[in-house]
Amino acid sequence: MRLLRPGGEEGLPAGPRGRQEEPEEARREAGRFYLGRYLRPGKMKKNGTDFDAAVIGGGLGGLAAGALLARRGYKVFLAERNETVGGNASVVRRGGYSFERALHQVYGLGSPGTPSAALLKEIGVDRKVEFIKLPAFMEVVFPGLRFTFPADSGELEAALCRRFPAERAAIIRMLDQGRSLYQMDRLMKFGSWKDRLKDCANPAAELRHALNSAAMMRYFRSPFSDYCREHFRDPELTAILGGPWIYLGVPPSRASAMMMVAMMGAYTVEKTFYIRGGSSSLSEALADSITARGGTVRTCAPVRQILAGAGGAKGIMLEDGTRVDARCVVSNAPARLTFNGLLAPGSVPAPYLERLRSMTTSVSALHLLIGAELDLGRLDKPPVYATSCYAGLDHDENYRLTLKGGAGSFGLCFHSLADPSQAPRGCSSLAAITMAPWRGRAYWKKNRAAQADRLLGLAEGVLPGLRRKVREMEIFDPAAIEARTGVDSGAIYGWENNIGQTLFDRLPQAAPVRGLFLSGQWTCPGSGMTMAIQSGGTAARLAAEYMGPPEKKR
């Protein structure tokens, strides 16, 4: 087994072929595409041409914002601190394997007519990226109990009703509420509900969705655990329905009931997908869309400062001293970094800064990227693409055990099951992930190997013999995640997805500084790659409205 880890620090015993440090040739290969294709340090004048929009951060939110602005005729400059664009939407390639830094699946992007797919179509990348439809969006596994969530609303309803016939009416009601929340979300993105009712073929159905959604609003700031106690009696059903909490990072007692129900609606109505070639395919397509329309994407370019004065944001200053003048700025950087680190003191209203101080960041994660000489497709019972395992039916206890370093919950994602090109023939690319508290860099430097070995053991409980079949493995702990993303404590969801910090309670895209707009998981609607893209689209539309029509020539 060859072990590759960020930072070159001591890792798991790797045997005679073990390597503790990423080889120089691998680093060169990782950066070749971007450093050759996009501007690298030294290739731009210190004070270059003016731009319409300067975008900070090449994660999906920033890329979507920049690409949409470029598509609408604005001149865009995007600065990314790493040597590759995409942020968490990127892959690591080692020994013939491709590993996802974060992506499990996306919803809606591959379904024509959804808001997110419509955004990709407007940008012009919808035909440049192939989305692989997944038959299920997850399997939840408990001791003596397992259930697969089909990625189809009707199939999920049928499966749950077969399993729990006594709860049929409540199941149908909940899933219908999820579908209604999804439909109302589409109305909010595609126009007013009054116009939609006037033009739609089935106004009675649209009105029912509106009434259902209005009824669900009372659960916006109620925990999903309370919703389940009110509507369901079977503890196994409650545990199954609460299983997707792992995608939010908080247990059902701390997650918004409306958010959980809406998530099931989105995943089963819009369907779920993996991206052919990995998430980098989407990130690269968005970056190429910017450069193809006269914009600039610069990697290895951390931002030192947002240039702002009495008239608002007017550009950015890079760490190397390059000044980029622009009519507006879109920040995809972490919220606290944007307002406390990149803007001069006194630029931001005190109540806004106090709100930022009062908000809670999410947990981080321990993430193993594994290449195994194991053909999952040839197993007697191949695993479900995304599988989440829990110690028991009590998700609060599962969460507590997880953060203490126990086996409360962990997830497995088998990327090569969806896209065999992610691994050599007869082999598999997979990821094992568990939530993890920060605990500081020193803790993770000392305990990384032991914690990774523990998680590998949990994965082996699902795939017996996995350990001896591992050929490549890379470890991302909270310290490594923080180093790559710039997010304090390596928070993988941005703000914690608790009641009071989800959907509309996240930051809006319009910042309290004139000419500054926000994108990414710190903003509404929230965490996850589809939502990041949606946030970038919203930021771009607001920025375009602020700037007015683009000038024909600059």
Image: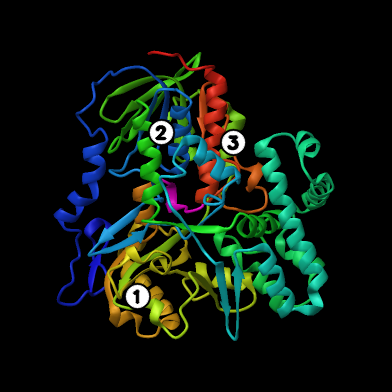
Q: Mark 2 and 1 residues: CB-CB less than 8 Å, in contact?
A: no
Residue at 65%, 43% (x, y): give it: 505
* Prevalent SS, magenta region: loop
Q: Which residues are magenta?
A: 486-493
Quadrant (top left, top right, bottom left, bottom right) of the C terminus: top left
Q: Nearer the viewer, mark 1 or mark 3?
A: 1
Q: What element does badge 2 sit on?
A: strand
| Position in image of residue 513 (x %, y %) | 54, 24
Q: Nearer the viewer, mark 3 or mark 2?
A: 2
Side of 85 relative to 395 (left or right)? left
Q: Return the residue at label 1.
A: 453
Q: Return the residue at label 2.
A: 56
Mark number, residue 354? 3
Q: Calculate the distance from the C-alpha at mark 3 to the C-alpha at mark 2.
A: 23 Å
Residue sitting farthest toward the front: 201
Residue at 69%, 39% (x, y): give it: 188
Q: Calculate the distance from the C-alpha at mark 2 to the C-alpha at mark 1.
A: 36 Å
Q: Mark 3 and 2 residues: CB-CB less than 8 Å, in contact?
A: no
Q: Residues within 10 Å of mark 3 (few under 14, many from 20)?
A: few
